[in-house]
Image: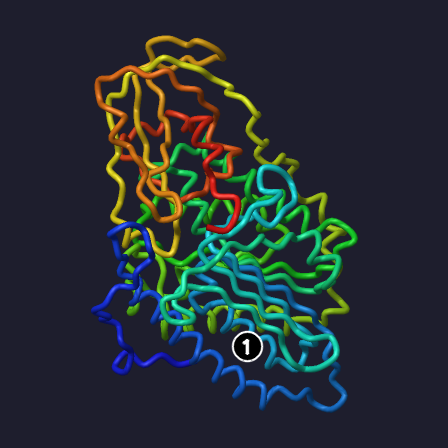
Amino acid sequence: MSTFNAQHSTLNIQQAVSLGVGRWTLGVGRFSKRLAIAAIASSIAIASLAQNSAAPAGQPRDLTVLILGDSLGLCGFSKRLDQKFRADPRVKSVFTYCTCGTNPLSWLKEKPFTHIQTHCGYWSIESKSDSHGIKEQRDTYGEPSGHRPTSHTVPKLDDLLATIQPDVLVMQTGSNLFELFSGREKVKPDRDGPMLRKYLVPFVKKAMTPPSKLRNIYWVAPPISGRVSSEVQEFVFEQTQKDIGGVTHVMDSRKLVAYPYKHMEPDKEHFVGEDMNKWADKVWAEIDSDLSAQALSDVRPLSESIAKLAPVAAPSATPAGASLIVKAKLVSKTKPIRREELMPYQEFLVGFVYDVEQVIAGEYGEKQILVMHPAYIGLQPQSLGKFRIGQTYELQLRMLDGSVWSTIKSKDDSGRIELEPYIRVQDEARYPKSAR
């Protein structure tokens, strides 16, 4: 998650779009313009595809498809894939939902994601039950010009399965799971494997559990990210394949589109244009081939294969109070990225390392502790200058795992991969919950 001619696109927008955050104006004009052009081109393409989508005589349209995506989906992937399904004579209806900044658990009702909202972009495309038309809602940067998205509640998989009753689910996700590694380049398999599994298996189990009628799940793993080490990216894909590959069709998008991308954003991860279309088209080709391999009536419901999933619990919601209170001296601070590198996201964490001087409450055995502090909330920089190296602080903490902040974009330059990340209780409560 159409055509895009680089020679006719205005990629070098000189004027920034004011976001009303003090004196700062973020150069999102380029990002907004690219999304707008991609959307216009996609709208033209979908009309063209629809003209050729009549089902052959005697072949019923009986497939219902559900597509879920994150911010890469908002960049054109999901719209393009939606078009491909709608143009296919086997497909009766398509329901597509893209929500920026989400991970697989964001789509579930379990805590801490029960009431989670997206603040950086939302796009839905739904088939109308009484016609061949569609209902489309789009709230993204630059549409209309200068627009900044409002908040939207992330749709829940339980509700979508019950109301839509899809036969096929396409899940485009994974880039935000890189944030579980807090910007480090190395992997610690004994810790990272179980951590990642808790974000994958509960979603797939929910998707397979009756009354779900799903027969196919296509899991679209992320393409290459230029901001994450190849070791982390390889580990995330291999772990995904290991944990859910027995019941889903996991696609390695790194093999489907070449990096660097032609129209790439400063974060070295988001892109639009012909590369985005190429990625979506190749994903569609794999799905089309798999669906064509046998009649859907011959494919058993996935609910019959649920026993193949290893039991695992989703990350438990963090407790109301601090699970750990320490007295600690700040010894290192990670410098935040520039705001233009954050787009389209609005929140960002940085890692601070402290020497533990005293454990006041709870249990902790390491000599140092890694605490993730919000550097941006709502695109506004947070006051981190009050934390000074060499100063001692009493920190009320809880583990980052299980927090709504767990897959927020982050950076930690300490290299201390053996340290479990924590977050202050006060900062946990600062996660945006409503429109800004």
Q: Is residue 252 visible?
A: no
Residue bearing the label numbered 1? 83
> Considering only vertical position in the picture, is 83 above or below 415?
below
Looking at the image, what colour scheme do you see? rainbow
Number of on-image labels: 1
Percent position of residue 212, x then y: 75, 55
- The picture quadrant where one finds residue 332 is top left
Disc 1: CA contacts within 10 A as few (<14), some (14-19) or many (>=20): many
> Considering only vertical position in the picture, is 13 above or below 252?
below
Residue drawn at point x = 53 percent, y = 71 percent: 81
The amino acid sitting under disc 1 is Gln
- The picture quadrant where one finds residue 163 is bottom right
> Considering only vertical position in the picture, is 78 above or below 356?
below
Residue drawn at point x = 53 percent, y = 65 percent: 123
Percent position of residue 381, x then y: 31, 42
Toward the viewer: 239 or 320? 320
Label 1: element kind: helix
Q: Is residue 434 visible?
A: yes
The reply, left or right, for residue 188 in relation to residue 99 is left
Percent position of residue 126, x then y: 63, 70
Residue drawn at point x = 66 percent, y = 74 percent: 127
> Considering only vertical position in the picture, is 23 above or below 423?
below
Toward the viewer: 44 or 424? 424
Percent position of residue 233, x then y: 39, 48
The reply, left or right, for residue 259 in relation to residue 88 is left
Toward the viewer: 193 or 263? 263
Residue drawn at point x = 25 percent, y = 17 percent: 391
- The picture quadrant where one finds residue 387 is top left
